[in-house]
Image (spheres, rainbow, N blue to C red):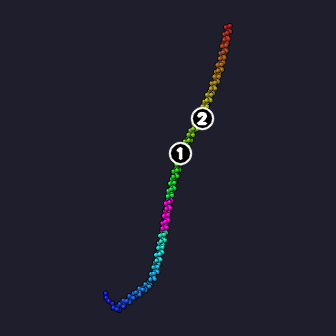
Amino acid sequence: MYLLSPKQQNVMKQLKEMKEKAQMEKDHYWKPIMADLKMECDVFKNEYKSKENEWKLERMTFKAERDAFKSERDIFKFEREVYKSERDILKAERDVLKSERDIFKAERDIFKSERDICKAERDVFKSERDIFKVERDAFKFERDIFKDERDAFKTERDSLLMESMGLKRMLLHGQTTQNI
C-alpha cells in the first residue's frame, strides 16, 4: 500500500462523491420504475397463482366429474350385466316353457293319435257289430226258413201220418170187412 497525497485524496474523494451522486441519480431514476415493475410482477404472480389455483380447482372438478362419470359408467355396466343375466334367465325360462309346450303338443298329438286309433277301433267294432247284426239277421232269416221248412215238414208229416192213419183205418176196416 502506498499513501496518496492530499490532492490525490481530494480528487479521489470527489470522484467517489461523483460516483455516489451518479449512483443516487440512477437509483432515483430507476427505483420507481423498478418498484412499478416489481408491483406489476407481483400482480402478474398473484394473477398467475389465482389462475393456477382456478385451473387446479377446475382440473379437480373435471377429475371429480370424470370419476363420477366413470362410477356412473361402472354402475351402468353392472346394471347392463344384471339385465343381461336377467335376460339370459328369462331366455332359459322361455326355452323351458317352449320345451314344455312342445312336450304338451307331443302329448296332445299322442292323445289325438290314440283318440283316432280308438275311433278307428270303434268304427271297426261298429262295422263288426253291423256285420254280426247282418249275420244275425241272416241266421234269423235262415232260422225262420228252417222253422217254415220244419213247419212244412210237420204238416207234411202230419198229413202223412193222417194219411197213414187213414190207410191203416182203411186197412183195418178193409181187413175187418174182408174177415167178415
Percent of width and height locating residue 150: 63, 22
**Residue matched to label 2:** 126
Q: Residues within 10 Å of mark 1 (few under 14, many from 20)?
A: few
Direction bottom: furthest residue = 7
User: Position of 158 compared to 58: left or right?
Assistant: right
- Quarter of the N terminus within the rendering: bottom left
The amino acid on which the numbered mark 2 sits, given as a three-letter code, is Lys
Q: Quadrant of residue 159?
A: top right
Magenta span has 8?
Answer: no
The amino acid on which the numbered mark 1 sits, given as a three-letter code, is Ile
Percent of width and height locating residue 3: 32, 89
User: Position of 45 compared to 115: left or right?
Assistant: left
Q: Kindly check if marks 2 and 1 are in contact, taking CB atoms under 8 A apart as contact.
A: no
Boundaries of the magenta span? 60-77
Q: For the stretch drawn in magenta, what is the main secondary structure?
A: helix
Residue 103 numbered tag: 1
- Quarter of the C terminus within the rendering: top right
Which residue lies at the image location 57% right of the left edge and 38% below the top edge?
118
Looking at the image, tell me whether mark 2 or mark 1 is earlier in sequence order: 1
The vertical placement of 28 against 52, above or below, is below
Which residue lies at the image location 59% right of the left edge and 33% below the top edge?
128
Cα distance in 3D space between marks 2 and 1: 33 Å
Q: Quadrant of residue 15?
A: bottom left
Nearest-to-viewer mark from 2 and 1: 1
Residue 64 numbered tag: none
